[in-house]
Image: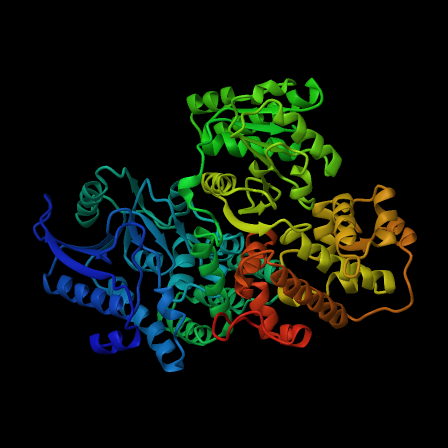
Amino acid sequence: MTFTADQAKAAFPDEVVTNAVTRLVKVPGLDKPVALITLDNGHDHTRPNTFGPQGLVSLNAAIDAAFAADPAAIAVTGKPFIFAVGADLSGVEAVADPALAREIAQTGHDVFRRLTETEIPTFGFINGAVMGGGLELALSCHYRTLSENTAAIAFPEVFLGLFPGWGGTQLLPNLIGPDAAVTVIIENALAQNKMLKVAQAAELGIVDEVFGSADYLEQSLLWLVKVVNGEISPARREIDRGAGWDAAIARAKAIVDGRTKGASPGATKAVELLELARENDLDRGYAAETDGLAELLMDDTLRAGLYSFNLVNKRAKRPAGAPDKSLARKVNKVGIVGAGLMASQMALLFVRRLKVPVVLTDVDQERVDKGVSYVHGEIDKLLAKKRVSPDGANRLKALVTGSLDKSAFADADFVIEAVFEELGVKQKVFADLEQYVSPEAILATNTSSLSITAMASQLKHPERVVGFHFFNPVAVMPLLEIVRAEKTDDAALATAFALGKQLKKSSVLVKDASAFVVNRLLLRFLGEVLVTVDEGTPFDVADKALEPLGLPMTPMTLMQLVGPAIALHVGETLHEAFPDRFTVSENLDRFVKAGKKGVWQWDDKGNATVDPEVAELWQQGDSPSTSEQVRDRALAAIAEEIRIMLDEGVVAEAQDIDLCLILGAGWPFWLGGITPYLDRAGVSEKVNGKPFLAPGVASVPLS
């Protein structure tokens, strides 16, 4: 092993060390004891086991002790509810020496590989959360069991701009096959770090057995005895190293190209290493992992990914500016004005997370019935997928009702409107509501762009009105923009934040300013691109201009997803508020009036061309831009808008802008947030004369 104990401590002096302790366990049916290695960092379950240099040294010593005991088998497990979740990212973030980066990469291989290459049977007893390097440790063992209550199983590295570098890219495809490995290592990671469920891990063959949590360790040891004694021989898949591997790598390349456009070196390297794993040569494969990891640990991509990770996992859990949570009122019933798709999605989320009565209302019974039916139908789908029990499904459906009479809101604690985006309509809705609800009930709006202060201006109690802006689809998008109007009081705001937490959303406090954060920036960006098309830039040139950033979708695709009519409406609202920066394209207006939904049409082979009707109605000038010029203009516009928003106090800090775009617009983790990207690319300095963040706060890649 590369590190000594003293070197490890010097490398990561602030490491929260996960110690590994070996004890010998006498198990009936075996002549020799089992050497059980337990990982434990000494903290409760809120601080998972991780591996820094000192943790790896401790694990190596525990393996030494296990070998010295000449056991019947060696098993590795974790503290209650947690196996291990990978490298100590807080320490890795500070690595500045290439030699140290290489030592970290090599040491993980050296230690974990001892469990792979010994003749003593080795077992990974995965008793809880297992991700990244923790999963690689388990894969390094000959056999694996899994606790049925394990909540987190994943390789998140590609999501962060890295790749599994302690054996994952070599061991997993040779255990479960290359196509399944592509799903786990690349596809899931690039799908917002999608986790595996316990049943999926078992079906894929990542683990050999699943046991109940109550007596998990005892059951795992009994199973170990049968394996050691030859009574059980866990099945291993036959691996197709020919055409099947070719197809898997082709799929991996397509996913990486589609999701990152080559902007994430970690994803690209993961594909290369999965291809190398075809040889099933650990010497060569591990050497390549070490080389790649040593390189990426020094790359800006890592710092970018960790900046994003810290925003989502730390800042999002302590929203800046949120009032004391003790001021929050309890919500025992929810009312929703409107029963359209957005309102129905909200109703489903409220009833699933809060398990309290939810009542919808609308202008006629048919719409109300349709909204309630949608929620009931979605609950039936959950039942079919066995995500709720029959009894649970019946209870949830019973909690969701509809009414044309707003007196049904009399005992509601939180009422949210999701009606047409017209200020007068929303003012009337709130005025009607105030006649029925209690003085303490919170009135919320899901508006995406309108002034909440104006919406509440005619009420007797404007202090209880708050913005509660979801993103579509409601169940999937994690961001919740919570908007404080001029008279919103702390109790209403605290209730909104507490509710957001119960709904498992990440909430950001936003000032009451047109379109808030995400829509304001997306429309500034989209508007700038549309201006270049109006000037004469071909649609395909403008639409592909931002591809080098690896954004989740192109501007035209974004417009089609949001809906051109909605984009136009929000754009008009922003133009009214900021006419000098937000223009309304006459072409877009004609586009919407013509009933067009998108610019592109696709042939049977998936090739996109401009819809001839769109090309005919879109009147273009004779001043086209290049892709680079479009990109420069769009980034400059965003940099300008962010600076204005920060100066206006729309959010507390630039980090909140970054958090909103990551969670609400799918800004890639490996880019590390929009503001540090603009800093690194020099756009902030060029446009505003200064960077958004202090030096060292975050680094991002230029490509």
- Identify the residue shown where x is 62% and y is 43%: 472
| 541 with respect to 234 (left or right) | right
| Position of the N terminus by quadrant | bottom left
Q: Is residue 97 left or right of residue 667?
A: left
Residue 462 image position (x, y, % from top left):
60, 37
Where's residue 336, x and y in %? 60, 29
Above-or-below relation of 349 to 34? above
Q: Is residue 701 visible?
A: yes
Q: Position of residue 586 (x, y in %)?
A: 87, 53
The colour scheme used here is: rainbow
Q: Residue furthest front?
A: 460
Residue 37: quarter of image: bottom left
Q: Give whichever of 214, 558 is nearer the camera.
A: 558
Q: Is residue 703 visible?
A: no
Query: Residue 60, relative to residue 80: is it above or below?
Result: below
Residue occupying image coordinates x 67% and y 38%: 457
Question: Image point 72% across, 35% down: which residue?
Answer: 420
- Where is residue 219? Give x, y as percent: 21, 40
Considering the image in quadrants, where does the C terminus appear? Answer: bottom right
Q: Nearer the viewer, residue 385 or 161?
A: 161
| Image position of 14 (left or right of 332) | left
In the rendered picture of this protein, how many numbered marks are placed on residues? 0
Query: Residue 359, relative to residue 648: is it above or below?
Result: above
Q: Nearer the viewer, residue 640 or 352?
A: 640
Q: Is residue 188 left or right of residue 555?
A: left
